[in-house]
């Protein structure tokens, strides 16, 4: 989680980004396809670094 958002690795579906706003229910903002199966995510500033299987890293710009 970072900046009121949750970043979820969902395997073959890639990266899901949710808004964790005040509504109490997470809202899906975006689904980003990755090169492989997304296994782990690290968010730093405006970038998400997604570890994929087999042995790749996707760097996704999160800036609007």
Image: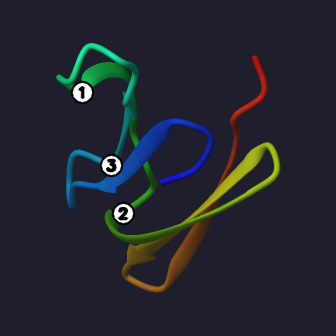
Give me the residue at 45% from left, 56% from top: 35
Between tags 1 and 3, which lies in front? 1
For marks 1 and 3, give the CA distance: 18 Å
N-terminal label among 1 and 3 = 3
Q: State the residue in front, 36 or 1.
A: 1
Instruction: Kindly identify which residue carries mark 2.
Output: 36
Instruction: Kindly identify which residue carries mark 3.
Output: 14
Between tags 1 and 2, which lies in front? 1
Image vertical order of residue 38 relative to residue 46, above or below: below
For marks 1 and 2, give the CA distance: 25 Å
Q: Quadrant of residue 61?
A: top right
Q: Quadrant of residue 39?
A: bottom left
Image vertical order of residue 27 relative to residue 3, above or below: above
Disc 2 secondary structure class? loop
Instruction: Kindly identify which residue carries mark 1.
Output: 26
N-terminal label among 1 and 2 = 1
- Residue 19 at x, y percent in the picture: 40, 25
**Circles 3 and 2: CB atoms closer than 8 Å:** no
Q: Residues within 10 Å of mark 2 (few under 14, many from 20)?
A: some
Give me the residue at 26% from left, 13% from top: 23
Image vertical order of residue 2 relative to residue 37, above or below: above
N-terminal label among 3 and 2 = 3
Between tags 3 and 2, which lies in front? 3
Q: Quadrant of the C terminus?
A: top right
Give me the residue at 62% from left, 40% from top: 3
- Residue 5 at x, y percent in the picture: 48, 37
Q: Residues within 10 Å of mark 1 (few under 14, many from 20)?
A: some
For marks 3 and 2, give the CA distance: 8 Å
């Amino acid at each position: 989680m970072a900046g009121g958002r949750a970043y979820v690795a969902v395997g073959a579906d890639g990266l899901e980004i949710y808004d964790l706003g005040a509504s109490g229910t997470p809202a899906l903002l975006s689904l980003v396809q990755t090169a492989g199966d997304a296994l782990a995510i690290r968010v730093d500033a405006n970038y998400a670094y997604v570890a994929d299987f087999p042995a790749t890293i996707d760097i996704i710009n999160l800036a609007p």
